[in-house]
Image (cartoon, grey):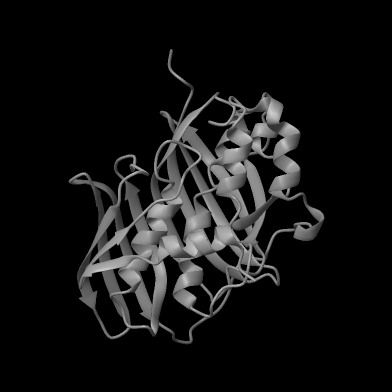
Amino acid sequence: MTNEALRDLLDLLDLERVEQDIFRGTSRPSVVPRVFGGQVAAQALVAAGRTVCADRLPHSLHAYFLRPGDPGAPIVYTVDRIRDGRSFTTRRVVAVQHGQPVFHLSASFQTHEEGLEHQEPMPAAPDPLTLPTAEELLPRHAHRFAHPQVVERLLEARAAVDVRYVDEPPFASVGEPREPKSQVWFRTNGKLADDPLLHVCLVTYVSDMTLLDSVLLAHGRGGWTVGDVVGASLDHAMWFHRPFRADEWLLYDQESPTSQSGRGLARGRIFTADGRLVASVIQEGVVRAPRG
């Protein structure tokens, strides 16, 4: 059964086709006063995917966040058909608001083929059902947040996707620098249709939720929710290795190798519950102490 929040998210990803290669999307309320980066990345990938043959699925994307998106205005996605080859298809998407580009995506799609196979082993992680839900975890730490309404906004933002932290998240361990590593389990709060592109786009959406946590953990910072960091995604890259379902448990294993110059780098690996490596993620973001 699909809950109301998940239905709203699926509606958000069901873009309106304005012209053959032009699409329009809306936004949902965000926990920050700008469009959530995972949303615009997922919508751009939807737009690209709708111009590609159904037997070709995304195997990689590379994106830049250019300007903060306005959640009160529609976003127009223009798709450029760069190349249609025998095995690979390339698309470029520009997202525009108020006459200015806010996001740029390049994505490559491939027909399925057999090839050499190997992968890293899945790291150890507890059963997700033994971990607290957002409804159980967030109220415990309400006293740490910069504003009383943060818990409510976070719960609304996580209502469509069940995200469970393996260890304490950054906002629960302020002032306690830790190894720059973080793990979360996630799945949608409801079953999804058997549309492989939809599952890829939903994982793209979730991939931007927690990736910079590992940067914050290295410095004992809680992030924007606590008010000790100003942050925003700068660029985002993903590679999709094997089929998966976003409505089944996925382990997001994340780490940060470096931060400097007001920027932090984070990388992640996404595994199925049975240990298959299905996606790799790298992101750089602004991570600054508040000025003044």
Horizontal and vertical percent for residue 41? 39, 56
Q: Toward which corner of the image does residue 257 lie, by quadrant?
A: top right
Whether residue 76 is visible to the viewer of this picture, yes or no, is yes
Quadrant assignment for the C terminus: top left
Horizontal and vertical percent for residue 73? 30, 46
* Residue drawn 38% across the image and 53% down it: 40
Quadrant assignment for the N terminus: bottom right
Q: In the image, 240: left or right of 155?
A: left
Residue 218 lies, with reference to residue 276, above or below; the image says above
Horizontal and vertical percent for residue 175? 67, 23
Residue 202 lies, with reference to residue 215, above or below; the image says below
Front-most of residues 249 and 281: 249
Horizontal and vertical percent for residue 5? 56, 57
Front-most of residues 41 and 71: 71
Instruction: Tally the marks.
Output: 0
* Residue drawn 51% across the image and 39% down it: 31
Q: In the image, 104: left or right of 218?
A: left
Front-most of residues 287 and 135: 135
